[in-house]
Amino acid sequence: MKKFFLIFFLLPLISCAENDSPNCLDSELGTAFPTRINQTTNLCSEDVSVTFLEALNESRCPSDVTCIWAGFVHVKLELKVNGKKSEIELSSNSTVNGVPATIDFESFKFILVDVLPYPSTTAKIDGNKREVILTVEKIGS
């Protein structure tokens, strides 16, 4: 009876520990994928991971307003490729602030596709629900 109770009690703890690993994305290179703020997404097919650290600047024109300037969003990410780490910044409009929309790191190209949610005057953006949409491509493929 004690063994049954012990197994019954420990089994959920063991299975939860296995699920605590970072999000593993079984996706092909070149396919856009989301990564939430403070979340790490691993590409299962490669030794590549991306962590969305923070949105540094959000000046995009709200979707429910007509603006004369589109604005831009600027984010900070941590990249890890084959054990090498780098903190980088990407922007949706590199001509405005000089921060690129794509960056090469190791043998991969990281491309900023979008940052969600898109700003609106009727809804406050919850920082915990932000996500960056990225595409990762192998250089030379």
Image (cartoon, rainbow, N blue to C red):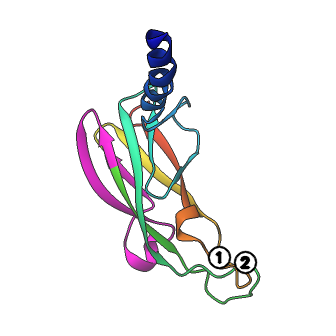
State which quarter of the image contains the C terminus. Answer: top left
- Under circle 1, the secondary element is loop
Q: Earlier in the sequence, mark 2 or mark 1?
A: 2
Looking at the picture, tell me which residue is in the foreground, 68 or 23: 23
Image height of 103 relative to 67, above or below: above
Residue that numbered label 2 is attached to: 63
- Under circle 2, the secondary element is loop
Image height of 66 relative to 127, above or below: below
Q: Which mark is residue 119?
A: 1
Residue 14 image-quadrant placement: top left
- Residue ID at (74%, 83%): 122
Residue 85 belongs to magenta span: yes
Do the numbered discs 2 and 1 sit on residues whose CB atoms are within 8 Å? yes
Spot occupied by residue 118 in the image (x, y as percentages of width and height): 65, 70
Q: Which residues are magenta?
A: 79-104
Hey, what amino acid is under mark 1?
Answer: Pro
Looking at the picture, tell me which residue is in the foreground, 78 or 13: 13
Spot occupied by residue 22 in the image (x, y as percentages of width and height): 43, 38
Spot occupied by residue 90 in the image (x, y as percentages of width and height): 41, 63
- Residue ID at (40%, 28%): 46
